[in-house]
């Protein structure tokens, strides 16, 4: 499974399938997380730029397990219905 979570967009993708926007505000996602990328058994966290221009952006953090907030976001994706197809005009 490939999982991508972008909290600022309320976006969750599983195997490139987007459902949303989802309300992710209830899942206590750390405010400095820009995105989570996960593939099978490993992944990484990407962080937001620092508000201080003299402080460098933190490097990506390699992860070997999904945190509870990521599991909650995934469950929100599972529970969300697929959107209706948009007709091509």
Image (cartoon, helix red, strand yellow):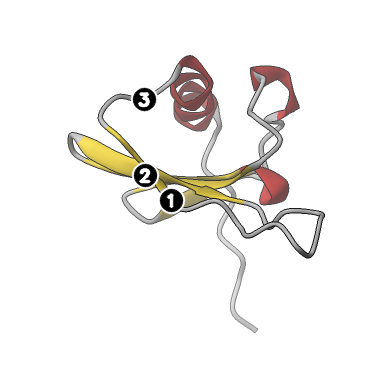
In this view, the residue in front, 89 or 71, is: 71
- Residue at 71%, 48% in the rendered image: 8
Q: Secondary structure at mark 2?
A: strand
Q: Which residue is mark 1?
A: 60
- Residue at 50%, 32% in the rendered image: 77
Q: Earlier in the sequence, mark 1 or mark 3?
A: 1
Which label lies toward us, 1 or 3?
A: 1
Q: Which residue is mark 3?
A: 66
Q: Residues within 10 Å of mark 1 (few under 14, many from 20)?
A: some
Q: Give x and y (percent) for residue 54.
A: 75, 63
Q: Give x and y (percent) for residue 29.
A: 63, 27
**Relative to 63, residue 67 above or below:** above
Which label lies toward us, 3 or 2?
A: 2
Image marks 1 and 3: residues in contact by CB distance under 8 Å? no
Image marks 2 and 1: residues in contact by CB distance under 8 Å? yes
Q: Hey, which residue is sitting farthest bottom in the picture?
A: 89
Q: Give x and y (percent) for residue 11.
A: 60, 47
**Relative to 63, residue 4 above or below:** below
């Amino acid at each position: 499974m490939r999982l991508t979570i972008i909290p600022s967009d309320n976006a969750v993708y599983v195997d490139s399938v987007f459902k949303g926007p989802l309300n992710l505000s209830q899942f206590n996602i750390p405010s400095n997380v820009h995105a989570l990328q996960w593939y099978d058994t490993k992944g990484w966290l990407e962080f937001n730029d620092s508000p201080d221009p003299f402080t460098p952006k933190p490097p990506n953090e390699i992860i070997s397990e999904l945190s509870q907030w990521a599991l909650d976001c995934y469950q929100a994706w599972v529970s969300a219905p697929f959107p209706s197809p948009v007709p091509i005009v």
